[in-house]
Each structure stands twice: as C-alpha cells, then as structure tokens.
Image: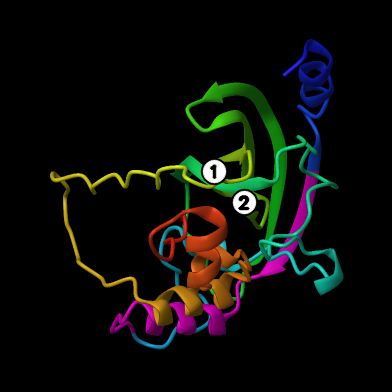
Amino acid sequence: MSAFDTEHLRAWIGRKESRTDTVTAWPVIGLTATFDRNDPEPKAGDAIPPGWHWLYFLEARPASELGQDGHPRVGGFLPQTGLPRRMWAGGRIEFKKPLRIGDAIRRDSEIVSIEPKSGRSGSLVFVTVRHTVSAAGETAVIEEHDIVYREAAKPGDPPPVAKPAPREAAWRRELVADPVMLFRYSALTFIDHRIHYDLDYCRQEEGYPGLVVHGP
C-alpha cells in the first residue's frame, strides 16, 4: 500500500464506539442446546459461561447494507481498506468477573492498531479492536479482536491450510461442527457471513474445501 493509504488507515486508530445490552436468558439457553450441554436453565443472577458475551451487543444491519458475502459492508466504525474480504484472525481475552443473567451491560470498543502487510495471498490489513465489557460500572471482560482484510480469492489459489488444535490442554471435548451447529451459532450471534452456512459459496467464491467454523 502507498504511504498515503497507510496514513489514511492509521487515522482510524483511536476511533471509539459504545453499545449497551442486557444479559437475557434465551441466548444462553440456545447456545447450551447448540453445544449439547446439560446445564440447568439459567435464572436471574446466574453467571453465564466465559466467552458467551459474544451472544450480546449484536449488530443488525438492514439487508440492503450487506455485501455479497453476507457481511455488512465496511464503513462506519471499522475502516474502509479497499480489500473486499473481512475475517476474524485471532484475539486475546481476559475475564475479570462473571456476567450474570439480568445484568445491564456496556461494551466500549476502540481501534487500537492498524497494520498493512503483504502475504502469500496478496495485500492484507490487520485491524485490532479492544472491547471492554462492563456491568454495574465494573470491568468484566477485556477482549482484543484481530480482524484481517484480504484480497478476493483468485481461481487456482490453494485452499488455506488448517491448523490442528493444541495437543496439550487442561481439558478437552470433541464436537462435530456440522452444518446445523454452524447455522445455529450464526443465528444466535447474528453472524451472516456465508462461509459458515453456504457450501457452494465457500467452494466457488472463497476457495475453502468446506464450511468454516466461526472464529470465536
């Protein structure tokens, strides 16, 4: 990218937005069923599992504002990079205190870094957003979310190489991420990217051999 492009992108660093929500029981019930867990039905005051803050602060753009991949078109809070594909690249999460059913919650988001790079697949732009989730004025979750913008897939590109899960862990559970599970997770989190449920789109447009499991 040119110096002008880089300077334009980095002008977005420091941009902020805030959202509010309430920790309701239904999304927890839905995700519990999706993951085939045997948890009791959540009641007011019960803590939700770590990471399930992803069920809240959902973005609902009108259908007319979605791109061909199902994702909302870029703009608004996130920068316009000129690259058409936007995906979850990684993240780091620190859990400070549990969120509980009935909590009024707030998420303050800030763009903390933007880094243009070049890779085997062409130009890339990595955007890191820091989300701070709080309840009753106390910080509950701090999450850094890395987003990668990429060029469109080209005919003949080799499919991305999958990385195996770590072999050493404190615990493990095997789940089959079948199309029904991926659809349910997409619905519960209102993630409308077609790589998670549209097999023809995955293979013909993005070059993946199968449906893609959600980053979170």
Residue visible at 23% across and 49% down? 165
Up-down: is 122 above or below 77? above
* Quadrant of residue 209 within the rendered picture: bottom left
Asked if residue 30 lies in the magenta stretch, the reply is: yes
Residue pointed to by mark 2: 133
Along the viewing direction, whichever of 177 and 198 lies nearer the viewer: 198
User: Could you tell me how far apart the alpha carbons at marks 1 and 2 are, in whole angstroms?
Assistant: 8 Å
- Residue 143 is marked as 1
Asked if residue 148 lies in the magenta stretch, the reply is: no
Query: Contact (CB < 8 A) between labels 1 and 2?
Result: yes
Instruction: Describe the colour scheme in one phrase.
Output: rainbow
Residue 53 shows in this picture: no
Residue visible at 58% across and 70% down? 189
Q: Is residue 126 left or right of residue 19?
A: left
Which element type, helix, strand or loop, lies under badge 1?
strand
Q: Position of residue 155 (x, y in %)?
A: 53, 47
Q: Earlier in the sequence, mark 1 or mark 2?
A: 2
Q: Position of residue 211 (x, y in %)?
A: 43, 66
Residue visible at 35% across and 86% down? 40
Q: Which residues are magenta?
A: 17-39
Callout 1 crowding tier (Cα within 10 Å): few <14, some 14–19, many ≥20: some
Residue visible at 77% across and 22% down? 10
Q: Position of residue 194 (x, y in %)?
A: 58, 67
Q: Is residue 107 left or right of residue 12?
A: left
Along the viewing direction, whichever of 131 and 126 lies nearer the viewer: 126
Residue 194 shows in this picture: yes
Q: Position of residue 71 (x, y in %)?
A: 69, 60
Residue flagged by tag 1: what amino acid is it?
Answer: Glu
Residue flagged by tag 2: what amino acid is it?
Answer: Val
Up-down: is 142 above or below 210? above
Q: Which mark's residue is nearer the viewer, 1 or 2?
A: 1
